[in-house]
Image (cartoon, rainbow, N blue to C red):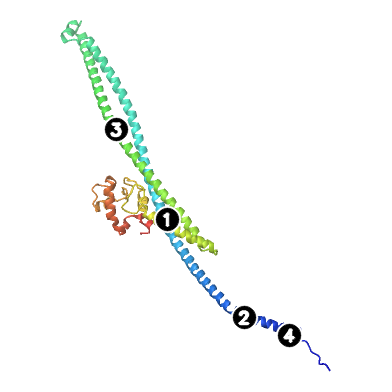
């Protein structure tokens, strides 16, 4: 008698097979899973450090933006002040030109008057040369009577007075013409001086305005970079970090820049803001020169002239360096805030 063999059911086989595969997978994948976790942790650490750096960049951009904003405000005030000084200088120049034009017209009138007086004098001299003046005996003998004698004498007196008036007019016209030439020469010198003042203030305004434009551009870039650093996009934040590095490098270069007309005794951005690198005459507050010394300050540091702009650049450099004192005297210049010194 044969014994029948029974086959195991399919669900049991499937379960066994799945269990075997799972066990094999667990055994094979156990070390690799540990390795992936370490890589992931390192990546998380790197990303965390990068996020901290990006957050720090955003904070630094905020500080840079505020500092640049203060610099823009300083330059805007300085531009407004120089524009006011320029308007006053242009008004003085206009007045000087008006006075000079009036003096030129008066000079022409005096020259015409002198010419006419000289012509009259020449005619008088020719008449005297052509006919000799009558003497008293001739007048008396030629008179038909006492009445005619008196009339003739009176006529001669009138002629003499007229001659004296002509001579006086010539002398007066000549004296006035000479004096007017002196006035005209003085006004010409004043016009040249006023023109030079306007030119210097124009040049200073252009330089200060250029600095203001550069600061405004830097402010816009810092603001855009800060907003990018606060963005959720990692690529934008990385670009913001690179922009921060560029802005800081540019700021460092600006502070250490020599500037045209240098070398300067104090940082160029301060000179650019104060005078635009021009030897300016006194403004409404009395400050003058390349470094905008007030008369009291200039005298206090030993200036050899009444006002700074009257001294040589070498002397102004020396005394500005003395006043700056390695940055400890920065408070003497309002524009020192441009380089982060208040």
Q: CA distance from mark 2 to mark 3?
A: 109 Å
Q: Is residue 226 left or right of residue 173?
A: right
Q: Which residue is label 4 attached to?
A: 12
Q: Residue at x 15, y 8 (%)?
A: 137
In the rendered view of the protein, which quadrant contains the N terminus?
Answer: bottom right
Query: Label 1, label 2: how many angstroms apart (C-alpha)?
Result: 58 Å
The answer to whether residue 86 shows anywhere in this view is: no
- Upstream in the sequence, badge 2 or badge 3? 2
Dot 3 falls on a residue whose secondary structure is: helix
Q: Nearer the viewer, mark 3 or mark 4?
A: 4
Q: Are marks 4 and 1 in contact (CB under 8 Å)?
A: no
> Distance between the Cα atoms at labels 3 and 4?
125 Å
Compared with 33, 204 (above or below) is: above
Out of 130 and 254, give the one closest to the viewer.
254
Closer to the N terminus: mark 4 or mark 1? 4
Asked where in the image residue 99 lies, by quadrant, the reply is top left
Instruction: Report the disc number at residue 185.
Output: 3
Q: Where is residue 163? Give x, y as percent.
A: 23, 17
Percent x, y of residue 9 = 76, 85
Query: Residue, x 38% and y 51% (percent of image)?
Result: 78
* Residue density around tag 2, few if under 14, some if 14–19, many if 20 or more, within 10 Å: few
Q: Is residue 180 above or below residue 289?
A: above
Query: Residue 106, labelled with which disc?
Result: none
Q: Secondary structure at mark 1?
A: helix
Residue at figure coordinates x 44%, y 57% from the top left? 247
């Amino acid at each position: 008698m044969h014994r029948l063999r029974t086959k195991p059911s399919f669900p049991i086989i499937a379960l066994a097979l799945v269990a075997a595969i799972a066990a094999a997978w667990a055994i094979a994948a156990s070390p690799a899973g540990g390795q992936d976790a370490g890589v992931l942790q390192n990546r998380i650490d790197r990303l965390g450090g990068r996020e901290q750096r990006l957050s720090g960049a955003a904070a630094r951009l905020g500080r840079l933006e505020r500092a640049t904003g203060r610099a823009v405000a300083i330059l805007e005030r300085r531009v407004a002040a120089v524009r006011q000084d320029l308007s006053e200088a242009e008004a003085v120049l206009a007045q000087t030109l008006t006075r000079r034009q009036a003096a030129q017209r008066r000079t022409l009138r005096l020259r015409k008057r002198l010419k006419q007086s000289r012509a009259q004098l020449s005619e008088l001299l020719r008449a005297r040369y052509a006919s000799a003046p009558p003497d008293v005996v001739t007048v008396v003998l030629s008179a038909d009577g006492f009445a005619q004698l008196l009339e003739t004498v009176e006529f001669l007196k009138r002629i003499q007075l007229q001659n004296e008036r002509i001579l006086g007019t010539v002398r007066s016209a000549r004296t006035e013409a000479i004096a007017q030439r002196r006035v005209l020469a003085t006004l010409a010198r004043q016009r040249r001086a006023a023109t030079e003042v306007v030119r210097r203030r124009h040049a200073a305004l252009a330089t200060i305005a250029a600095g203001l434009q550069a600061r405004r551009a830097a402010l816009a870039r810092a603001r855009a970079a800060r907003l990018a650093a606060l963005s959720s996009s990692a690529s934008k934040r990385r670009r913001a970090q690179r922009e921060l590095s560029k802005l800081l490098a540019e700021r460092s270069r600006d502070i250490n820049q020599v500037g045209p007309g240098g070398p300067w005794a104090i940082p160029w951005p301060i000179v650019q803001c104060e005078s635009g690198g021009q030897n300016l005459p006194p403004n409404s507050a009395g400050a003058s020169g390349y470094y905008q010394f007030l008369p009291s300050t200039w005298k206090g540091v030993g200036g050899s002239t009444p006002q700074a702009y009257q001294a040589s650049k070498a002397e102004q450099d020396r005394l500005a360096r003395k006043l700056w004192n390695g940055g400890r005297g920065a408070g003497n210049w309002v524009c020192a805030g441009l380089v982060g010194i208040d």
